Amino acid sequence: MPNILALNYDEILSFTKQFRDEGEDIVQLYSNTRERMHLLREEWSGEAADAFYEEMESELLPALQRVSGALFLCNEVLIKVMKITHNADEETIGFFGKDLDSDFGLGGFQKSLAGDRLDRDQHVAIHPAPKKAEEP
C-alpha cells in the first residue's frame, strides 16, 4: 500500500494555537514566580533562604524558560510543516489539474475497473464477489 500523508489543517492550527497559548502561560508563570521570589527576598533571609533562591535561579526558572521556548518552537515548526505541505499540495494540484477531471481522475479510474469498486477508506480496489450460476 502506498504511503499517504493526510493533514487536517484545522486540527494543526488548533495544535499550533495550543502550543502558543501554553507557551504564553509558562512565560506568565515564570514572570509571576520571579516577581514573588523577589518580594519574598525582602522578607526571608538566612541559609535556607539563600539555598532556596539559588535553586530557583539556577534550576527552576531556567527550566521554565526552556519549556516555554520548546512550546514556541513546536508552534513555529508545526506552522512551517503546514505551509510546506500546503505548498506541495498546491503544486501537485497545479501539476495534475490540467489533465484530470474535478474528481482528480477517480471517475476514469473507476470506469476502467469494469465492475470493480474502490473502497476510499482503504484505498484499495475491492472486486465484487463472482455471480452464482443460475440454477435451471
Image (cartoon, rainbow, N blue to C red):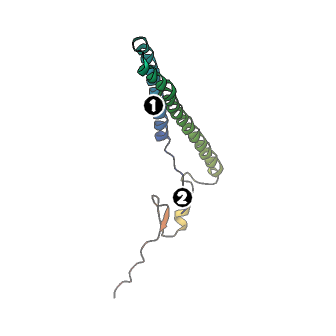
Question: Distance from label 1 to label 2 (Cα)?
Answer: 43 Å
Q: Is residue 52 above or below residue 4?
A: above
Q: Position of residue 9 (x, y in %)?
A: 50, 41
Secondary element at tag 2: helix
Quadrant (top left, top right, bottom left, bottom right) of the C terminus: bottom left
Q: Position of residue 109 (x, y in %)?
A: 55, 63
Secondary element at tag 1: helix
* Nearest to N terminus: mark 1 or mark 2: 1
Of marks 1 and 2, the one in the foreground: 1
Q: Position of residue 70 (x, y in %)?
A: 53, 34
Residue type, label 2: Leu
Q: Position of residue 107 (x, y in %)?
A: 53, 59
Crowding around mark 1 (Cα neighbors within 10 Å: few <14, some 14 to 19, many 20+) is some
Q: Mark 2 points at which residue?
A: 106
Q: Mark 1 points at which residue?
A: 22
| Residue at the (48%, 30%) spot, across then down | 23
Residue lying furthest left: 136
- Label count reads 2
- Residue 51 occupies which quadrant of the picture? top left
| Residue 28 in view here | no
The reply, left or right, for residue 70 in relation to residue 95 is: left
Residue lying furthest top: 42
| Residue at the (42%, 13%) spot, across then down | 39
Residue type, label 1: Glu
- Residue 119 occupies which quadrant of the picture? bottom left
Crowding around mark 2 (Cα neighbors within 10 Å: few <14, some 14 to 19, many 20+) is few
Q: Is residue 129 above or below residue 99?
A: below
**Residue in front for this viewpoint, 101 or 14:** 14
